[in-house]
């Protein structure tokens, strides 16, 4: 028997609303299939399931908002008899052993209300009532002795929520702003960032790309951004400590390279969904995945694993005319790579000055995990990859 | 009828109905008892059944145990709980233990009445509340009648128990007036009683502090807080269920106990609430107990050392937060 739980689809997500089930009780479902649509503060997400079997029970109704980790469905796994094992096995442990080690469950940082965060000062009965009413105690201010949240405070919060639903449920843009605010404030508060930058000669890469695109139909043409993503992914294979997760005071290196792409949304805010196994995709496949991801991000139909799996983020503000971007790391990741615009600059090499297209690549990295030396090697590796575009 | 008269009425009823019953203790006969509880009984029942004893608690409690072992129904009066320390060896090592050590062959149907508590300027050797120590001992039943009706009914009920029963009579209660139904045979001595029902906070107490808890509930009522008052009645075994049922409703509890706070019955009740009602609590359990000093003689110091109505009120108010 496997449990399908409300996934954590972002560092600061504490709850999600079930929009609809894609499957019914008795349906057969395959690992990787979409089981449900879930609304988070950032987007409506298509959530995949990590077990194969028959859906035995659906425990949450559409429009219900539940905390992350809530069991939403029970799946009777194939080849296993009901009631045979006493302990539900967390779905992700069933992933074939190698090479995929990082799992959403491991990657997901603990929410502030759980381990690692500040302890909420709340009475036992108030805690129970808050859970029953679906009120996040973190959002309630306590009036009891020493600021303890009492039962009356939770009842008051429930009344306030009822009286002013608009206030309690701000529109998605406002909520996303809050989520970004929380994640970025936490990042700047907790992560000792260091920043490096280098200017990369893009003439070879762009020349190669021009030649390649001549062979392709208009729809299949590749944008230079895809070369940057692939170069970053390959460089990460050489400097793997930047492809890590910081969780509970420990660094965990990820075996998969899932580059998150920062995508700004039209309604404001941004998401950074992952391109799974970026290092192993061909340029053409990467291009396909990339445009698919952008379209879906803007349409609000991302998948749960795309939001939970990035192991690093790449942001590019070149289109906005920015020369260099020094970004803030998205926890629990430990590095962020930024690219500015491609610009023609006088370039001196071998005693010759010529005009070349160049781009500024920057690295924001977590000094708890890596040092400037390794960060520098990483940027050099990105540079080198872009000098041999045919190998990308 | 007063509490004193209610105890006397119960004694008289027991003495009349069962020839095995007799009363023994210091000054219970010719003097009529230190608190005049047994006044007049010597004339009615004679010196065989109303027996004055030497000033030796160990001896006359031990004699009571021996009589009980041999088929009598002795009622032993100990003048104050402080003096009962002298009989502790007999109580713990014999009264509470013999049934167990004899594999059930021996039984000790002994009733001991003990005056307890302060508030009468009797100083530190006559004023303490040590009933919590007795409640620590397996093998005995410990009762604390707090009302006139219970003074009557619980004594009669104690005489039906097959094992030793200790009745702690708070000395300030003897003049208390109340109603007694003398046709009633015996009261249930296993259950606590809700003396006043309320919804915001549970005041848990027994014996001499019941009156203070009731007064505190009146004050709280005027301030918009609805207090439920539980009279424990039995200190061993404790009726935990009545306490838990109340806390499930009020989510707040104050324990009022005239004994010292450390290692007290109030501590035991707090622990049981924590163990069994953790998820119902909206605030830590509060305790109002006596100051941890030997009871002072000076009137103002004694008053300061004992639990006060205002302390109960402020403990209850402190744990309840109000909106609007």
Image (spheres, coloured by chain):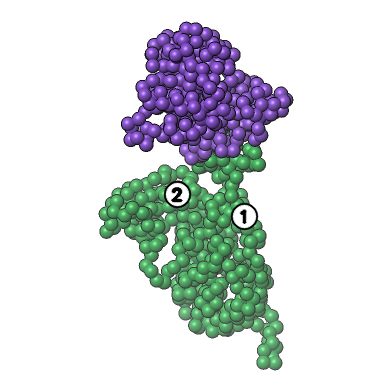
Chain colours: A green, B purple
Q: Quadrant of the N terminus of chain B?
A: top right
Q: Mark 1 — on which chain does it sit?
A: A
* Left or right of B46 in this view: B209: right
Between residues B107 and A221, which one lies in front from this camera angle? B107
Q: Secondary structure at mark 1?
A: helix
Q: Quadrant of the C terminus of chain B?
A: top right
Decide which of tag 2 and tag 1 comes sooner along the chain: 2
Measured in 3D between alpha carbons, the distance from the residue under mark 2 to the one under mark 1, in whole angstroms, is 23 Å
- Position of residue B246 measured from the top left corner of the image (x, y, whole percent): 50, 29
Farthest front residue in view: B54
**Residue drawn at the location 54% of the way across and 31% of the way down:** B86
- Position of residue B116 measured from the top left corner of the image (x, y, whole percent): 57, 24
* Left or right of B297 in this view: A374: left
**Residue drawn at the location 60% of the way across and 34% of the way down:** B260
Mark 2 residue crowding within 10 angstroms, few (<14) / some (14–19) / many (20+): some
Q: Is residue A184 above or below residue B264?
A: below
**Which disc is residue A182 wearing?**
1
- Position of residue B20 measured from the top left corner of the image (x, y, whole percent): 38, 16
Residue wearing tag 2: A70
Across the whole image, how many numbered discs are drawn on residues?
Answer: 2
Given this view, does label 2 or label 1 mark the residue nearer the observer? 2
Q: Is residue A286 above or below residue B289?
A: below
């Amino acid at each position: 028997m496997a449990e399908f739980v409300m996934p954590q689809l972002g560092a600061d997500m504490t709850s999600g609303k079930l929009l609809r089930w894609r499957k019914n009780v008795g349906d057969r479902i395959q690992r990787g299939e979409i089981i449900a649509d879930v609304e988070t503060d950032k987007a409506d997400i298509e959530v995949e399931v990590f077990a194969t079997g028959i859906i035995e029970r659906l425990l949450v109704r559409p429009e219900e908002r539940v905390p992350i980790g809530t069991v939403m469905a029970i799946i009777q796994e194939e080849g296993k008899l009901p009631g045979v094992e006493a302990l539900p096995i967390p779905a992700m442990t069933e992933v074939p052993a190698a090479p995929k080690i990082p799992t959403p469950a491991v990657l997901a940082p603990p929410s502030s209300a759980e381990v690692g965060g500040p302890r909420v000062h709340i009475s036992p009965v108030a805690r129970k009532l808050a859970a029953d009413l679906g009120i996040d105690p973190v959002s309630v201010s306590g009036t009891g002795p020493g600021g303890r949240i009492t039962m009356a405070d939770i009842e008051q919060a429930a009344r306030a929520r009822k009286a002013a639903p608009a206030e309690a449920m701000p529109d998605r843009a406002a909520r996303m702003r809050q989520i970004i605010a929380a994640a970025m404030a936490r990042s700047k508060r907790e992560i000792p960032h260091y920043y490096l930058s280098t200017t990369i000669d893009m003439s070879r890469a762009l020349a190669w790309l021009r030649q390649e695109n001549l062979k392709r139909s208009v729809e299949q043409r590749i944008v230079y951004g895809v070369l940057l993503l692939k170069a970053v992914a390959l460089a990460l294979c050489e400097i793997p400590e930047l492809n890590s997760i910081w969780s509970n005071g420990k660094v965990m290196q990820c075996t998969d390279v899932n580059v998150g792409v920062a995508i700004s949304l039209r309604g404001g805010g941004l998401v950074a969904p992952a391109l799974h196994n970026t290092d192993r995709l061909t340029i053409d496949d990467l291009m396909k995945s990339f445009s698919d991801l952008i379209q879906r991000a803007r349409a609000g139909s991302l998948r749960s694993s795309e939001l939970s799996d990035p192991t690093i983020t790449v942001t590019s503000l070149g289109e906005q005319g920015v020369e260099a971007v020094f970004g803030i790391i998205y926890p629990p990741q430990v590095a962020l790579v930024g690219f500015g615009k491609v610009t023609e600059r006088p370039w001196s090499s071998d005693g010759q000055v010529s005009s070349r297209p160049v781009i500024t690549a920057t690295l924001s990295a977590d000094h708890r995990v890596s040092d400037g030396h390794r960060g520098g090697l990483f940027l050099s590796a990105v540079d080198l990859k872009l000098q041999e575009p045919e190998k990308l | 009828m007063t509490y004193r008269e209610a105890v006397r009425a119960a004694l008289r009823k027991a003495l009349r109905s069962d020839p095995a019953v007799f009363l023994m203790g210091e000054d219970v006969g010719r003097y009529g008892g230190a608190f005049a509880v047994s006044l007049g009984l010597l004339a009615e029942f004679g010196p065989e059944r109303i027996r004055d004893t030497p000033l030796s608690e160990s001896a006359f409690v031990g004699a009571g145990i021996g009589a009980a072992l041999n088929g009598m129904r002795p009622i032993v009066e100990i003048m104050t709980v402080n003096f009962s320390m002298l009989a502790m060896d007999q109580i713990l090592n014999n009264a509470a233990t013999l049934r167990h050590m004899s594999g059930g062959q021996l039984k000790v149907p002994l009733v001991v009445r003990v005056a307890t508590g302060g508030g009468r300027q009797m100083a530190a050797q006559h004023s303490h509340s040590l009933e919590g120590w007795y409640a620590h001992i397996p093998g005995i039943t410990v009762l604390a009648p707090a009302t006139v009706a219970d003074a009557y009914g619980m004594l009669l009920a104690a005489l039906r128990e097959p094992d030793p029963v200790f009745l702690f009579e708070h000395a300030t209660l003897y003049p208390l007036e109340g109603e007694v139904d003398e046709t009633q045979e015996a009261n249930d001595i296993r259950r606590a009683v809700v003396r006043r029902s309320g919804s915001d906070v549970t005041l848990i107490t027994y014996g001499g502090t019941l009156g203070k808890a009731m007064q505190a509930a009146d004050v709280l009522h005027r301030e918009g807080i609805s207090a439920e008052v539980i009279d424990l009645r039995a200190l061993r075994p404790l009726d935990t269920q009545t306490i838990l049922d109340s806390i499930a409703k009020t989510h707040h509890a104050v324990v009022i106990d005239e004994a010292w706070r450390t290692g007290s019955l109030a501590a035991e009740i707090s622990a049981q609430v924590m163990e069994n009602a953790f998820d119902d609590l909206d605030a830590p359990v509060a305790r109002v107990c006596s100051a941890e000093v030997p009871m002072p003689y000076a009137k103002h110091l004694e008053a300061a050392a004992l639990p006060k109505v205002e302390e109960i009120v402020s403990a209850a108010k402190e744990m309840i937060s109000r909106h609007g």
